[in-house]
C-alpha cells in the first residue's frame, strides 16, 4: 500500500534568500592595486552578508546570482572597476563602471533583492521589460 509519501520526501522548500557568488580578476601583482582590489571584494562580500542578509558562496554553480568584478587598468594612472550582476538565468541585469565601489554596495543589494522578490512572486522578468 502506497500513501504518497515519496513525493513529499522529495519536496524542497524554496530558499528564502538568494545565494550570491562573487567572481573577480585581480590586478597584476606588480600594479600596486592588488591590496585595494582585494579590499573591495572583501567589503562587498561582508556588506552583502551583513547588511543585505544574502548568502555568499564561493561555489558559483550553486549561486542564484553572480556578481563579477573586473579590474581594468587604463592609460597612465586611470584604473576602473567594472561590476556586472547576472540573474539565475545568466542574464545580465545590471552593470556599473566605477573607480570607487563602496557607494555601490547598497545598489547591488537592492538590484539582487528586487529581482529575487519578483521571481519568488512570479512577477515579470526584470531583464526584459516591455
Image: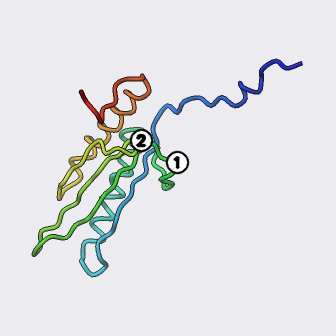
Label number found at residue 124: none
The residue depicted at 42 percent of the width and 22 percent of the height is: 121
Secondary structure of the residue carrying numbered label 1: helix
**Among the 4 quarters of the image, the one containing residue 40:** bottom left
Residue 3, position as x, y percentages in the image: 82, 18
The residue depicted at 42 percent of the width and 23 percent of the height is: 122
Give the camera-side residue of 54 and 130: 130
The N terminus, quarter of image: top right
Q: Which residue is mark 1?
A: 62
The C terminus, quarter of image: top left
Q: Answer above or below: position of 114 versus 82.
A: above
Residue 96, position as x, y percentages in the image: 21, 50
Crowdedness of circle 1 by 10 Å Cα count: few (<14), some, many (20+)? Answer: few
Q: Answer above or below: position of 54 versus 12.
A: below
Q: Which tag is nearer the camera, tag 2 or tag 1? A: 2
Secondary structure of the residue carrying numbered label 2: loop
- Whole-angstrom CA distance, mark 2 to mark 1, is 13 Å
**Among the 4 quarters of the image, the one containing residue 123:** top left
Q: Which residue is mark 2?
A: 89
**Among the 4 quarters of the image, the one containing residue 110:** top left
Amino acid at each position: 500500500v502506497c500513501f504518497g509519501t515519496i513525493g513529499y520526501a522529495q519536496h524542497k522548500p524554496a530558499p528564502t534568500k538568494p545565494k550570491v557568488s562573487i567572481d573577480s580578476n585581480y590586478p597584476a601583482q606588480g600594479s600596486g592595486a592588488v591590496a585595494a582590489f582585494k579590499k573591495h571584494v572583501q567589503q562587498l562580500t561582508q556588506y552583502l552578508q551583513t547588511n543585505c542578509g544574502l548568502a555568499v558562496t564561493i561555489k558559483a554553480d550553486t549561486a542564484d546570482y553572480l556578481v563579477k568584478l573586473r579590474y581594468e587598468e587604463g592609460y597612465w594612472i586611470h584604473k576602473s572597476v567594472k561590476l556586472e550582476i547576472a540573474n539565475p538565468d545568466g542574464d545580465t541585469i545590471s552593470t556599473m563602471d566605477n573607480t570607487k565601489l563602496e557607494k555601490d554596495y547598497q545598489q547591488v543589494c537592492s538590484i539582487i533583492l528586487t529581482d529575487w522578490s519578483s521571481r519568488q512572486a512570479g512577477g515579470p522578468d526584470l531583464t526584459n521589460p516591455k
